[in-house]
Image: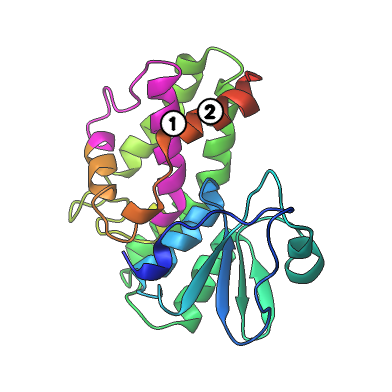
Amino acid sequence: MATSDVRIPPLTSAASDPPPLFDGTTRLYMSYTCPYAQRVWIARNYKGLQDKIELVPIDLLNKPAWYKEKVYPENKVPCLEHNGKVLGESLDLIKYLEANFQGPSLFPTDPAKREFGEQLVAYVDELCMNVYASFKGDTVQQYSASFDYLDNALGRFDDGPFFLGQFSWVDVVYGPFIERFHIVFSEVYKNDITNGRPKLAPYIQELSKIDAYKPTKVDPKEFVEIFRIRFLGQQ
């Protein structure tokens, strides 16, 4: 892990001053707990940009006022400060890193893989919404179709364990959510989402071995606490 990836405490409203904004430093404003920010963090790591893009962690429950006022009026993460401008939205930022920085590509050249990758990414929000909706009903019954979809998608290419065979932007997009779903269904609902899904279990195992991904993983205990408060109304 690069020195710049040592986890410093998130910046809060009461205990932080802004960094020297727009001084030529490229900064990724993010949160250790946000899956959307994790996407861009992974992409940044995969392309070997740890020394070129500084991480600025934000406390999402206690955001510094300067973040909205001086950096990103949308007041959410992730956003990227680069070349005197600020850009947001995780999918756009993954593509921005690909187009504007050197390093290994996350986008396959094979036309069939590119097409299938676009289809998968176009579906990710709907899949996540379906899983979130299941938290309010018969959880195990309602989420099954979503994880069956993932298992089937993992079988499209046989040259590796990932969605497009080899690790790609599709895994960057889906991985943070699959990680969280795996944790919450195991810890809260005592159900293993990989049961009966032979490709999903090795996928999660292999994802955890990716060097770009490992330092970004969420703390399971912290995430379960956040989930219980946000989705179950438990303190």
State the separation of the CA atoms marked 2 and 1: 6 Å
Compared with 101, 37 (above or below) is above
Q: Residue at label 1?
A: 221
Q: State the image coordinates of residue 41 (x, y, percent, origin top left).
A: 46, 61
Residue type (three-letter) at the residue carrying disc 2: Glu
Q: State the image coordinates of residue 105 (x, y, percent, origin top left).
A: 35, 73
| Disc number for residue 94 | none
The region drawn magenta spans 172-201
Q: Where does the N terminus fall, quadrant-wise?
A: bottom left
Q: Which residue is situated farthest in the left direction here?
A: 159
Report the residue at 56% width, 53% height from top: 31
Report the residue at 63% width, 20% height from top: 235
Report the residue at 46% width, 53% height from top: 173
* Marks 2 and 1 in Cβ contact (< 8 Å): yes
Q: Which residue is situated farthest in the top direction here?
A: 138
Q: Is residue 70 left or right of residue 145?
A: right
Within 10 angstroms of label 1, few (less than 14), some, or many (20 or more) residues?
Answer: few
